[in-house]
Amino acid sequence: MVTQGYREHTALAELLRHGNLEFHQQLQQVLSNPDFAVTEKQSQERRRENAYDHLRYLVKEIGGTRDVATDLPELFAVFDWSAVLATDLIPLISGHFNLASGSLATLTDSDAAAPYLHDLDDASSVGVMLLTEYGCGSNIGFMQTTATWDGNGFVLNTPNPRARKFMPSVGIPVARVCVIGARFIDAAGVDQGVHLFTARLRDANGEPCPGVTITQLDHQPLVIMDNSVISFDNLRVERSAWLSNDLATIDDEGVLTWRDETSRKRAFASAISQLTVGRLALSSCLNASARASLYIALRYAAKRVVPLTPVDTTFMIDIPHVRDTLLTDLAGTVARTIYGNAIKTFLAGADLTARDTVVSVMLAKYFIQKHALETVTDCRIKMAAQGMFSANRVANYLGVNHAAITGEGDIYVLGSVAGRVLAKQLVSTPPLEPALHDPADPGDRSRLLRARTLTIAQEIQPLLGDPALQARLEVIPDALELADAYCAEQALRLLDEHAEHHPEIAALRDVFALEQINKQSAWYLTHGLLDIAAIKAVKQQLRGGLLPQAIDDLADHVPALLDAFGLDDEILGAPVLSEDLPAAWDSRCNDLSRN
């Protein structure tokens, strides 16, 4: 029995983990190095400097930046464990590994990229990407920064104040390699759209290079970043620093020639291809922060004794509003972990410029990230006063979630765009005929989620066919509903595939499906798919009680699920994980006073 239980635990951990176990374990050690611990006495400026020091140490320990940037399982693991153990690193690894190194490694030839990748590989220069501007925000197809041909290379300029690059983390004076988005204006004055160019933004001494002006912005209260505003005044860029992805050529006269018409159509998607990787990496790390929050909150709730009367006590986890909230969050987070891992596996062999690839990641980002924030927030609140302190980790995860969710405007923009595309793809698939379903039947639950997806897709077709601006605005709420419904349906399908071999997955699958149905009970009622009795049954299944219910069944499997998360009490170091909470806080406070 012990051997069988170990095998089941190991198999469950492998299902939830994406990538090599040894690399994950190495990252835990590197990212929890006490030499880079954030202390109460550190200023905002010192925390920023500490993050850069930690980045250099991380690169030294795990190998060349280029190798990690192009090995997606390793890249995702770096994001995940940074979010859990070293939140200040997230803004840096995104620019350094993914956006700069990833773009250079994939969008130009090795000779052209070599001088820059060499410096990024050992973090002697820190990478960053400059896309967003005051005027266009994250709608980067409308950026105004220009790149013009001067006979030997390119000259980048900021034509007006609204074209300044807004937000990149380049305030700290360290050497910088930068990938810049700009509109290429050819020799004939024709706007050839957005292209990417590589330049050194700061020299080896950390000083801005000629033609670059950097103004550091105010600090952010939720996340430590050295955000800045950047403008260009005749910044020279070498000809070889154009990241063309071999889709076009530029002759000595500055005339651009596309390889073919397909290349012209792929150009913008090529330029932002590493954004697609980054969107999934950030979604993955927010899911990791949600898992860590649940691990901490649920383990605390299982040992926290709550006095209710002079003679009655209970554990916090048995209080209905704590148990029901955290267990439905647990089901949703594990479902999204499995769903996200499937998208990661797909992405590793996909064409990053293909519409299906881009849309799949946009859908995943919308589905995963907003739930991660809800979960972290719930854990913070349920932990009450203990949840307010950085020592218990969860409060720190809020900043990472907010930063990632709003890193490209907000996730609802991407969700609505992806929902529109999805609706067009589903136009030829009719919804099921209205009929009452039994939510106690797992097969009917799957059919209910499928029916919702297809029905919404059909109902918004009239608005999709209307080119008027008002119609484009009116369709957004329904497009978001479709994105969410489709992803939930796909996640449930994946849970069904694994439920037979993992009783823990079967239990959380039931809670996940019932919670999805419960949230949309009014929709199912008005569409004739459920009646009042069925809706009452769903709600009862999502409450614990004297009778066996879905939420109680999942509660029995919580220890195994938390063990499978691969987290470590000692590395997390949260006082609430200790068996002796007062002693844990005493020890921490004494350590702080000595430091």
Image (spheres, grey):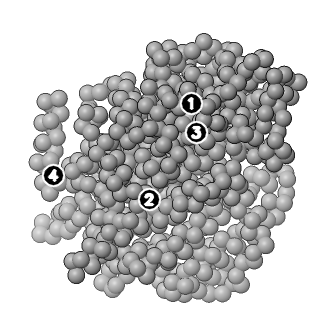
- Give the number of the mark in front: 2 or 1: 1
Q: Identify which residue is drawn at 44% across, 43% down.
A: 400
Q: Which residue is mark 1?
A: 114
Give the mark nearest the N terminus, 4 or 1: 1
The label on residue 18 is 2
Cα–Cα gap, marks 4 and 1: 53 Å
Q: Which residue is mark 3?
A: 105
User: In the current view of this chain or complex, which residue is farthest to the top?
Assistant: 210
Q: Quick check: can you spot residue 377?
A: no
Q: Identify which residue is drawn at 56% across, 21% down.
A: 201
On screen, residue 349 versus residue 3, left or right, reads right
Quadrant that contains the C terminus: top left
Cα–Cα gap, marks 2 and 3: 23 Å
Q: Identify which residue is drawn at 67% across, 22% down.
A: 238
Badge 3 amino acid? Ala
Q: Identify which residue is drawn at 29% across, 62% down.
A: 298
- Give the number of the mark in front: 3 or 4: 3
Reply above or below: 551 against 46: below
Give the mark nearest the N terminus, 2 or 1: 2
Q: Position of residue 444 (x, y in %)?
A: 56, 84
